[in-house]
């Protein structure tokens, strides 16, 4: 079977798509992967062997400038037209789209040729690009059991598949917390200023400073945070980038971070309690954090309420009661068979 996988935009779209592409390639299917310029190298570096990579001319339409919005729509329309022509000569049997604006022209072209199309939503609240594309698909696959913001006029069949993660997370799924007093703080690839401000000061105000902190931050903040932790006699390892995030989560008793879909699902795959602080301008992250908290795996707290006093009190309570950290880790654990589930759904 010839299967076209549409991705692009960010690593959060690309890594799940590559996991599914790899699973489908293992099953003997012929894979074509499309992406935009931002993720072209990422896709080519992780695509399964013998797959074909296609560049899509597209970008997000969320810019404030009306001119930039119109230009973005023009690029999407031109890409859709090019794909409609391409599918005349090389038509896939299935299209699997992983969201982002780079997937929209592929989904539309597939709709024109009545190609069965499957859309995956990574967040607990449907994104704008997927919401727009829903009119052309019959199956929506989700990372979370429930998804908010679904268009009312859709007839799409919704299937809960989960969100694929990299193999290194699957390899450590269900590992027990080390009970070593280890706290992991991560704001994602760009860091998070609110975490850099609140977390160090909260720990410094605690009477019990036996916590060991691994703190990932922006490169320009590394020296300042290293100095702060040293002056307050807090054991800490401050980094601008964590290459092996799976091991970092495995070695932690608790995680403090944002709540992008990949972060939340990685926590659920390994089984780690967390304090999640959603990006205050991103409703998707708020929905993801709420879904995680509902499991009993930790706290979802608004950025405006994420104070030094609250955090110091919460960390003291948790690290003084490691059995509670263990229960949070156990409740957060969700078995992840997403890549197989998606491949099964697509190839039925």
Image (tube, rainbow, N blue to C red):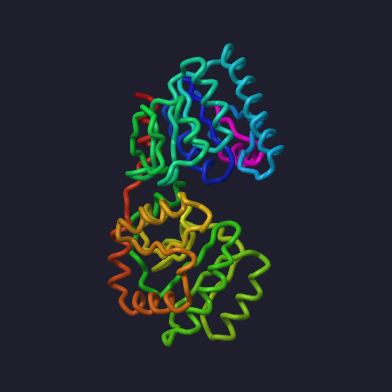
Instruction: Say if 255 sits above or below 107 in the image.
Output: below
Please identify the quadrant where the N terminus is shown: top left
Is residue 45 on the magenta stretch? Answer: yes
Query: How far across and how far down the image is residue 308, in percent?
Result: 48, 77
- Report the number of numbered marks: 0
What's the residue at 40%, 64% (across, down)? Answer: 274
Please identify the quadrant where the C terminus is shown: top left
In terms of secondary structure, what is the magenta stretch mainly? Answer: helix
Instruction: Say if 150 sits above or below 303 in the image.
Output: above
Query: How far across and how far down the image is residue 269, in percent?
Result: 37, 52
In the foreground, 304 or 144? 304
Q: Residue furthest top?
A: 88
Query: How far across and how far down the image is residue 58, in percent?
Result: 64, 33
Is residue 214 on the magenta stretch? Answer: no
Residue stretch rendered in magenta on the structure:
32-46
Instruction: Say if 172 sits above or below 298 in the image.
Output: above
Instruction: Say if 267 sits above or below 148 in the image.
Output: below
Task: Specify whether 339 is left or right of 72.
Answer: left
What's the residue at 41%, 42% (across, down)? Answer: 149
Q: Residue furthest right?
A: 67
In the foreground, 205 or 65? 65
Query: How far across and how far down the image is residue 289, in percent?
Result: 41, 56
Q: Residue furthest front?
A: 66
Task: Name the quadrant containing residue 255.
Answer: bottom left
């Amino acid at each position: 079977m010839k299967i076209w996988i549409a991705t692009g935009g960010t690593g959060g779209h690309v890594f799940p798509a590559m996991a599914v592409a790899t699973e489908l390639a293992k099953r003997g299917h012929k894979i074509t992967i499309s992406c935009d310029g931002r993720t072209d190298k990422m896709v080519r570096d992780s695509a399964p062997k013998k797959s074909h990579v296609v560049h899509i001319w597209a970008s997000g339409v969320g810019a404030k400038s009306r001119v930039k919005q119109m230009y973005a729509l023009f690029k999407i329309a031109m890409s859709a037209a090019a794909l409609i022509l391409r599918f005349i000569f090389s038509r896939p049997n299935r299209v699997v789209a992983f969201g982002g604006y780079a997937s929209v022209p592929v989904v539309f072209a597939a709709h024109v040729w009545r190609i069965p199309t499957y859309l995956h939503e990574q967040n607990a609240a449907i994104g704008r690009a997927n919401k727009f594309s829903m009119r052309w698909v019959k199956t929506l696959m989700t990372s979370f059991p429930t998804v908010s913001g679904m268009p009312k006029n859709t007839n799409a069949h919704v299937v809960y598949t989960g969100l694929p993660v990299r193999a290194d997370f699957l390899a450590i799924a269900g590992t027990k917390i080390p009970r070593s007093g280890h706290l992991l703080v991560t704001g994602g690839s760009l860091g998070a200023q609110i975490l850099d401000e609140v977390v160090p000061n909260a720990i410094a105000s605690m009477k019990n400073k036996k916590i060991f902190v691994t703190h990932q931050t922006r490169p320009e903040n590394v020296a300042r945070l290293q100095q702060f932790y040293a002056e307050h006699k807090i054991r800490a390892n401050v980094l601008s980038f964590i290459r092996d995030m799976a091991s970092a989560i495995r070695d932690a008793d608790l995680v403090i971070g944002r709540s992008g879909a990949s972060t939340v699902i990685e926590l659920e795959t390994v089984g780690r309690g967390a304090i999640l602080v959603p990006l205050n301008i991103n409703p998707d992250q708020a929905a993801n954090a709420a879904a995680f908290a509902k499991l009993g795996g930790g706290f979802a707290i608004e950025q405006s309420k994420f104070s030094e006093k609250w955090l110091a009190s919460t960390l003291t309570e948790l690290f003084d009661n490691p059995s509670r950290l263990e229960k949070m880790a156990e409740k957060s654990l969700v078995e992840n068979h997403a890549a197989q589930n998606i491949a099964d759904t697509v190839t039925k």
